[in-house]
Amino acid sequence: MLQQRSARLLSQFSSAPSRVFTPAYLRCRRAYSIHADASVGTKIQDIDPSKLSITKTTTPKDLLPPEELVFGRNFTDHMLSLEWTASQGWLPARITPYQNLSLDPATCVFHYAFECFEGMKAYKDKNGNIRLFRPDKNMARLNKSSARIALPTFDPDAMIDLIGQFVKLDSRFIPDARGYSLYLRPTMIGTQRTLGVGPPASALLYVIASPVGPYYPTGFKAVSLEATDYAVRAWPGGVGDKKLGANYAPCILPQMQAASRGFHQNLWLFGEEEYVTEVGTMNLFAAIKNKETGQKELLTAPLDGTILEGVTRDSVIGLAKERLEPQGWKVTERKFTMKELADAADEGRMLEVFGAGTAAIVSPVRKISWKGRLVECGLEDNVEAGPIALQMKEWMEAIQYGDEDHPWSYKLA
Amino acid sequence: MLQQRSARLLSQFSSAPSRVFTPAYLRCRRAYSIHADASVGTKIQDIDPSKLSITKTTTPKDLLPPEELVFGRNFTDHMLSLEWTASQGWLPARITPYQNLSLDPATCVFHYAFECFEGMKAYKDKNGNIRLFRPDKNMARLNKSSARIALPTFDPDAMIDLIGQFVKLDSRFIPDARGYSLYLRPTMIGTQRTLGVGPPASALLYVIASPVGPYYPTGFKAVSLEATDYAVRAWPGGVGDKKLGANYAPCILPQMQAASRGFHQNLWLFGEEEYVTEVGTMNLFAAIKNKETGQKELLTAPLDGTILEGVTRDSVIGLAKERLEPQGWKVTERKFTMKELADAADEGRMLEVFGAGTAAIVSPVRKISWKGRLVECGLEDNVEAGPIALQMKEWMEAIQYGDEDHPWSYKLA
């Protein structure tokens, strides 16, 4: 709410030109001081699901054969959209046929990357119910992301309600089989049509949905990573922990570089210490034996601002604490270095390494190229996944597909 | 060209889902290795200005009174657009009526910030000629920006030719008075319509134009800055030196914070040393007397990857070396700290501080809030600009408006 209010009050700033401050800006700034002190103001609207309007398509799409589904390439019949303005707040939500956005070429999303998004999935369970997985985590993160770039925030429960209605309307697109789901992409963009650099006075929140198949249709395939030391994805005090568009485009070139040398993804290191942070666009977990005690440890980088706060990451940690610690494991969020991993590999203490993200749940890692050597990550040549990765995928899917009753699974009414 | 080719070859990657790598990705990666080794391939088109098509508006706009012009709010009758595809390269340029872009909601510019831009101006000289200012610098920087985010590059001379034709067509929008100009916004966006994180297989380069008035219509007004120590704009190995949309949205909140405490802009410091980098969205210059020698020094941060490579910055340095050094000044690009500035102020060695950018040319600074104190920047209370800032504005405008013949001024034929 505070964020909404600040954005509203400061929207007048957006006439400030790029790279400078106008006399108009100075006048507005003074006006802001006055407004900010006033405790009364126009009440602006939060999201109200009861005001949803639905316009159904008159040209429903044919369903693709499940085996032809490609991530994020084909979308359902409809989309959910909500406009926001600084003066009115959130306007009534609309479900419409999937359609192009028509935007002035001066719209701020094209120039200053006022954009953030989420990735989440809807699943069909064995009884035909539709389930979301921890949608509250995605909505909380979207609010954090949007607030960081002066876009509006919203009531997360109201938004989950709307997403649920949208998913139900297009539920025929969710293939009824294990491993299949409907990938949901909530996206918020700034829509102000001026080139001044300032908080957008208008925004659009929309959700599109793409049916997707299993990530590894024929079983896990372990991947090889290249540790990136010449480019930095995120840093303390930056925005690498938010799901902003800004964090993605700059990552493509290092991925292409890694690919050109035969690696599937790059692994982002940070600092002279070469802390292990993220892999490509996933969080990373390493299972090693403690050098002193021999205890099995599941490590992942801490939320220090340099890694994305992955929902899958959080879920893996939660399940590991609940189900692996009783088996003698230690689950730790702490900084760890590439050298620690290499030492574990050299000393026979490396158990396994895997990425964690919404699309694949877990993605086992075979080896990491680092400083001219290959760090083997504990997999035998003919094995494509370690036991923890396999176990995690099983546990997660049991919850996601409703085989196991669990508070993380959100069944649509 | 290499960039174009890589983007083309790798475009098949873009079906890779967010945060993971598919088997399809792995197959494509192998395909890439093969392609990359092949020395022959389809020749893809660079920009060819002779293929420009022009569709004039049938509803020309009324010109606004010059005093009503607001930066980046009103645009001319037309826009220049060029589409690029990975398979064909640059398609023929088009000048059309200014119009909305119609884009699929899955378009990658909305999700992953595939976007970069330039800011430059066209001026009318006293003989009615139209002049650009160092357009080669803007095109070179746009190519650097686009290459860094896997967008295509282009022949800069061809693009300057097209921009010239566009500006001439809409030249009636350039007010014929000192201080007025036509702000040009070349923008490149990725237009691929899939959610896979990878190099876009299509892009759009467009230019829109906004008539603007003098930055300080009634003379300079010195500004106050707040040094930001809680957020970090850029990092070595990051992309802070490129003109990417990604660098802008995250800067709004610190600017709003500074504004809420009564400052016009924030000043970005870097590291424990608190190096002075940029102000808001401008480069920064400080003129101080050397502690040992008493020599006058004009300082600005070096191009170490943490500051934008400003065209105005480069021009100020060039003019200062040519015209101030013979007067005994020393012009230096080096790291300098906030403490150095504070010491200079405390010891009576502070001469003046100013920002430098396309919109205002120079923007004098009165004071900087830092660690609970105000560092005064050398201006008497009743003075709004120091002599170097005044001199620089005069020199720059003489070149921009063609009063002085100079290779930086590019007269349209």
Image (cartoon, coloured by chain):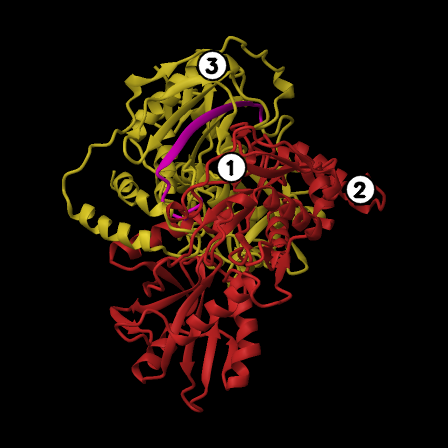
Chain colours: A yellow, B red
Query: Which mark sits nearer the N-terminus, 3 or 1?
Result: 1
Which residue does the numbered mark 2 point to in the structure image? B34
Q: Is residue A272 visible?
A: no
Same chain assignment for discs 3 and 1: yes
Which mark, residue A171? Answer: 3
Q: Where is residue A396 drawn, in percent x and y? A: 46, 30
Which residue does the numbered mark 1 point to in the structure image? A105
Question: Which is nearer the eye, A62 or B245?
Answer: B245
Q: Where is residue A171 drawn, in percent x and y? A: 47, 14
Residue A348 versus residue A63 in the image, above or below: below
Instruction: Please state which amino acid type lies under the numbered disc 1.
Output: Pro
Chain at numbered mark 1: A
Q: In the current view of this chain or complex, which residue is farthest to the front?
A: B127
Q: Nearer the viewer, mark 3 or mark 1?
A: 1
SS assignment at label 1 = loop
Q: Is residue A276 visible?
A: yes
Instruction: Please state which amino acid type lies under the numbered disc 2.
Output: Ile
Same chain assignment for discs 3 and 2: no
Where are the magenta residues, as a range?
Answer: A195-214
Q: Residue at x 34, y 81 (%)?
A: B343
